[in-house]
Image: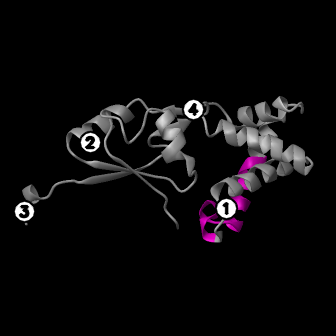
Amino acid sequence: MTSSSLRLQCITVDVTGTLIAYKGQLGDYYCMAAKAIGLPCPDYERMHEGFKAAYKNTTKRFPCFGSRNKIHDKEWWRICVKDSFIEAGYLYDDVTSEKVFERIYAAFGSTAPYAVFPDVHPFLRWARSKGIIVGIVSNSESRYRDVILPTLGIRQDSQAQPQIVSLSIVA
């Protein structure tokens, strides 16, 4: 088989850092969630450090965003967010903690915290023009395929976009 008879048929890309980036700082979203239910705004630096510690611990306890433990990624994030506040020195009762979590989870299920890199749509149009399937990979957020990416204009049904296959990788 010669190299001229080989044709690229599929490209896979990770969502975060390749297609999209986070806008703003983590503390912005955590603070807004707390303020929305009448709590004082948490200290951004404490929240940032608290999140890093909670993320690391939650990842150790429940690898691959919970898929190894057969827990839904929303539950994984619930644990991580609650522990982020605890690590930062904010201990809320279960009802308050759940209200804060639901606001944060809703924010990250919208377009608010994400920016699409400027080369994404030209790349996807190029891939479609070549008949290349683009596999979009993430193991952190089940809402990417059906909610987040379509609202950001990255979707399977658009004529301007390639066929997108959303995958979840289990490590």
- The residue range painted magenta reads 50-68
Q: Which residue is mark 2?
A: 127
Tell me residue 109's x, y (percent): 61, 40
- Spatial separation of the CA atoms under disc 2 and disc 1: 34 Å
Q: Which residue is mark 3?
A: 2
Mark carried by residue 27: none
Q: Quadrant of the N terminus?
A: bottom left
Mark earlier in primary sequence (2, 3):
3
The amino acid at mark 4 is Thr
Mark earlier in primary sequence (1, 4):
1
The answer to whether 27 appears left or right of 8 in the picture is right
Tell me residue 7's x, y (percent): 16, 54
Q: Tell me the SS state at disc 1.
A: helix
Q: Which residue is mark 1?
A: 59
Mark in the foreground, 2 or 1: 2
Asked where in the image residue 26 lies, by quadrant, the reply is top right
The amino acid at mark 1 is Thr
Residue at 44%, 40% in the rendered image: 19
Mark in the foreground, 1 or 4: 4
Q: Residues within 10 Å of mark 3 (few under 14, many from 20)?
A: few
Above/below status of 124 relative to 72: above
Q: Residues within 10 Å of mark 1 (few under 14, many from 20)?
A: some
- Spatial separation of the CA atoms under disc 1 and disc 4: 25 Å
Q: Is any part of residue 69 visible from this angle?
A: yes
